[in-house]
Amino acid sequence: QVALAESGGGSVQAGGSLRLSCVASGNTNRDNCMGWFRQAPGKEREGVASICRAYPDDPLYDDSVKGRFTISHDNVKKTVYLEMNNLKPEDTGMYFCVGRFSDYTLGSRGSFNWNFYNYWGLGTQVTVSS
């Protein structure tokens, strides 16, 4: 079993920055992909960024955050980060950390399919005001 715990959310003005963290605990010494999804009130959940252990230099980003958000993974600290810069009001939402941990080689760069992942955090709120 794996547990994911997010932190770092908050309220900022447009143009500001936040860094989200997600610490994985439990049986984590396996191949994995981790990522972030977000959901705004009244909107569907969407994938934001994803990074895999096998492809640490080739993460996935949604087009809406490319050039503004950076995902990174510290394997020693078992933590994935989402550095968010130049935040916009449309970035407002609950941000969820997700993880896919496998005893087998995943051979993936990640996914924006929620069901690809087998562990999910409870979320951290990000609010960006104009």
Image: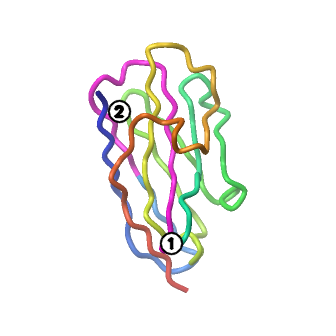
Residue at the bottom extreme, as displayed: 130
Magenta stretch in the rendered image: 21-42
Question: Residue 16: x, y in percent?
Answer: 53, 73
For the N terminus, the image quarter is top left
Residue 84 lies in quadrant: bottom right
Q: What number is the disc on residue 107?
A: none
Mark 2 vs 1, N-terminal side: 2
Q: CA distance from mark 2 to mark 1?
A: 27 Å
Please tell me which residue is depicted at 66% across the width and 42% down the height of the picture. 60
Residue at 63% x, 20% y is 107
Lateral position of residue 1 relative to residue 31, left or right: left
Disc 2 packing (10 Å; few <14; some 14–19; many ≥20): few
Residue drawn at (36%, 60%) of the image: 124
Q: Write down the residue under mark 1.
A: 92
The residue at 65%/59% (across/down) is 65
Q: Is residue 106 left or right of residue 29?
A: right
**Amino acid, disc 2:** Lys
Q: What percent of the width, then of the height, locates residue 79? A: 39, 38
Q: Which residue is mark 2?
A: 77
Q: Nearer the viewer, residue 120 or 16?
A: 120
Q: SS for tag 2?
A: loop
**Chief secondary structure of the magenta portion:** strand
The x and y percentages for residue 42 are 51, 74
Residue 38 is covered by the magenta coloring: yes
Q: In this view of the protein, which residue sits in the foreground, 57 or 98?
A: 98
Where in the figure is residue 119, as x and y percent of width and height? 39, 37
Question: Residue 114 colored magenta?
Answer: no
Residue found at the far right of this picture: 63
For this rendering, which residue is in front, 6 or 100?
100
Three-letter code for the amino acid on which mark 1 is drawn? Thr
